[in-house]
Image (cartoon, helix red, strand yellow):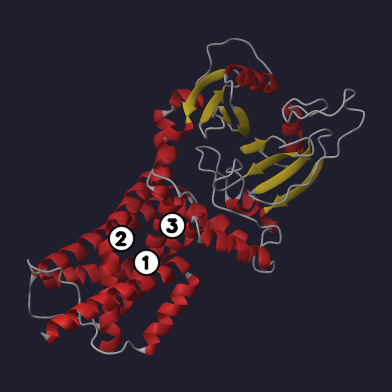
C-alpha cells in the first residue's frame, strides 16, 4: 500500500499546490457567472426593458438597415428575438473582432448599445475560460487545471480511505484538525465537483474537440451531424449539438432577381423579410425567445435557433426546447429542423450538462447548489493549505517524500489510462516524470557525498 500511497500523495500535493491559484480564480468567476442573469437584469434595466425616445414604428428590416447605416464597418451577426419584457437584441461585429449589442424596443427603435466585451456576463465568461488573456495557451492551461482537478478528486478519495485521517484520535493538534476537515470536505464534494468539471469540458480547447470528433465518428453514441466546437464562431448562440451542423442550401428562384446575381446577404433581391422568417419560425412551433442568423451567401439559409446555453440573459431555454430550423432565404420554406429529440446521447447529455454547469438548468435551486459546492471547494483548498503550513519546515518546501524504489505497475497503468482519457494530463505527467527524475538524481548525489 505504501508503494502506491506515497507517489499518489506526492502527485496530489504538487497538483494542489501549482493549480490552486487557477482553481480559486475559476471558482470565484464561476460563482459570479452563476448569477449573471440576476445581476444584468438590474444593472442593464435601460438596455433590456426601456423604450426609445424616438416615436413611431418601423419594421425590423428597416431597423437592421438603420443599424448598418449608423455603424459603418460592422456586420450584422445575429438577431435575438426576445420574449416579453425583454427588448430584442442585434449583435454586430467588425473585422477587428469587436462586437456590440444594439437593443430595439417594441417599435424596433434603437434604445441603447453596449460594447459586448465589457458586459458583466462576457467579462466573467472570458475570465473563467481564458483569464481575460485569451489565446490557445491560456485555454489549454485552464483545461489542464480541470484535468488535474479530476486527478485530485480521485487521488484525494483514495488517500482519505487508505490513511488514518478519518480515525478518531486522542491527539489534538491543529495539523490533524485541518487535515481531517480537508479530507471530509473532499469526500463531500467529490461527486459534485467531478460533475461540474466534466460538464465544463465541452467548451475546452483540446478535449472539447475530441468529444465532438468522437460524437461525429460514433453516430449511435453521438449525433450523425454533430460537429460542435468551442464557442468561437459567430453562431455561438446555436445549441451545442448543431453549432457546426452542415446547413442545407437555398434554392434561388430564377425569377426573383431580374438583374443578375447579388452578393449581398442582407436585403438581397428576392430575400424574405425578417418578419416573414419570424412568422415561418412560429408556424414551425419555434416560439420566442430565439436567435436568427442571416444567410452567409446567396446559397445560404436563415438559421433560427433556441438554445439552452446561449450565455445571453433572457435567451436560454430548457434543454428539451432546443431546436434549430433552416429557412430558404428566397421562398421562406422550411428546409430542415433539428430538435432535441433528434440529438444523440452525447448531444442530449451536454444539452443538460452545460446549463447544469452554468447554474440555470433548474432555476434558482441549481444556482444555490453550485454556489454551495464552489464555496465548499474553496474551503477545502483553504484547509489543505493550512495543513501544509502546519507541516512545512521554514527551510524546505516540505513536499511528501519521493518513493524509494520502483513505482507499482498498478499505479502506472492507472496514470496511463487517465493520460489517454485526458491527453493534456498525460502530457503534463511526462513533464512531471522528467522533473522527478532529476530531483531523484540530485538527492542521490547528495546522499553519496
Q: Where does label 3 land, which residue?
A: 140
Please tell me which residue is depicted at 62% across the width and 29% down the height of the picture: 75
| Residue depicted at x 41% and y 48% | 130
**Crowdedness of circle 1 by 10 Å Cα count: few (<14), some, many (20+)?**
many
The residue mark sitting in front, 2 or 3, is 3
Residue located at (38% from left, 49% from top): 30
Residue 288, image x, y percentages: 63, 37
Tag 2 secondary structure = helix
Q: Is residue 186 above or below residue 104?
A: below
Quadrant where the C terminus sits is: bottom left
Name which quarter of the figure residue 141 lies in. Answer: bottom left
Residue 265 in sight from this viewpoint: yes
Q: Secondary structure at mark 1?
A: helix
Is residue 284 at least partly visible in the picture?
no
Disc nearer the start of the sequence (1/3):
3
Residue where numbered disc 2 is placed: 19
Task: Tell me: 346 left or right of 334.
Answer: left
Amino acid at each position: 500500500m505504501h508503494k502506491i500511497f506515497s507517489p499518489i500523495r506526492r502527485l496530489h500535493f504538487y497538483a494542489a499546490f501549482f493549480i490552486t491559484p487557477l482553481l480559486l480564480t475559476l471558482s470565484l468567476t464561476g460563482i459570479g457567472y452563476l448569477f449573471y442573469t440576476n445581476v444584468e437584469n438590474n444593472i442593464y434595466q435601460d438596455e433590456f426593458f426601456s423604450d426609445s425616445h424616438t416615436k413611431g414604428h418601423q419594421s425590423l428590416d428597416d431597423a437592421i438597415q438603420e443599424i448598418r447605416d449608423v455603424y459603418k464597418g460592422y456586420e450584422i451577426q445575429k438577431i435575438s428575438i426576445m420574449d416579453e419584457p425583454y427588448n430584442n437584441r442585434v449583435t454586430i461585429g467588425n473585422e477587428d473582432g469587436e462586437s456590440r449589442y444594439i437593443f430595439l424596443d417594441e417599435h424596433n427603435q434603437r434604445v441603447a448599445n453596449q460594447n459586448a466585451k465589457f458586459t458583466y456576463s462576457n467579462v466573467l465568461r472570458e475570465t473563467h475560460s481564458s483569464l481575460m488573456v485569451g489565446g490557445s495557451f491560456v485555454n489549454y492551461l485552464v483545461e489542464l487545471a480541470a484535468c488535474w482537478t479530476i486527478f485530485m478528486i480521485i487521488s484525494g478519495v483514495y488517500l482519505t480511505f487508505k490513511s488514518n485521517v478519518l480515525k478518531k484520535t486522542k491527539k489534538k493538534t491543529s495539523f490533524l484538525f485541518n487535515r481531517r476537515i480537508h479530507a471530509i470536505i473532499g469526500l463531500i464534494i467529490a461527486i459534485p465537483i467531478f460533475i461540474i468539471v466534466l460538464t465544463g469540458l465541452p467548451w475546452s480547447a483540446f478535449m472539447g474537440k475530441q468529444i465532438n470528433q468522437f460524437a461525429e465518428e460514433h453516430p449511435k453514441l453521438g449525433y450523425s451531424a454533430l460537429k460542435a466546437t468551442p464557442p468561437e464562431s459567430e453562431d455561438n448562440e446555436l445549441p451545442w449539438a448543431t453549432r457546426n451542423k452542415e446547413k442545407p442550401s437555398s434554392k434561388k428562384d430564377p425569377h426573383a432577381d431580374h438583374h443578375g446575381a447579388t452578393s449581398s446577404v442582407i436585403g438581397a433581391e428576392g430575400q424574405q423579410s425578417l418578419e416573414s422568417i419570424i412568422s415561418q419560425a412560429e408556424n414551425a412551433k419555434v416560439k420566442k425567445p430565439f436567435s436568427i442568423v442571416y444567410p452567409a451567401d446567396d446559397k445560404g439559409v436563415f438559421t433560427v435557433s433556441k438554445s439552452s446555453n446561449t450565455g445571453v440573459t433572457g435567451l436560454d431555454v430548457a434543454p428539451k426546447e432546443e431546436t434549430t430550423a433552416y429557412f430558404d432565404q428566397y421562398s421562406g420554406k422550411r428546409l430542415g429542423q433539428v430538435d432535441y429529440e433528434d440529438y444523440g446521447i452525447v448531444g442530449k447529455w451536454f444539452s443538460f450538462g452545460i446549463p447544469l454547469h452554468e447554474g440555470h438548468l433548474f432555476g434558482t435551486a441549481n444556482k444555490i447548489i453550485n454556489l454551495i459546492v464552489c464555496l465548499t471547494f474553496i474551503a477545502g483548498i483553504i484547509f489543505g493549505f493550512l495543513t501544509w503550513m502546519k507541516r512545512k519546515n521554514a527551510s524546505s518546501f516540505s513536499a511528501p517524500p519521493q518513493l524509494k524504489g520502483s513505482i507499482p505497475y498498478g499505479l502506472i497503468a492507472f496514470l496511463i489510462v487517465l493520460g489517454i482519457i485526458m491527453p493534456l494530463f498525460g502530457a503534463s505527467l511526462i513533464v512531471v516524470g522528467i522533473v522527478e527524475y532529476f530531483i531523484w538524481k540530485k538527492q542521490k548525489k547528495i546522499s553519496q557525498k
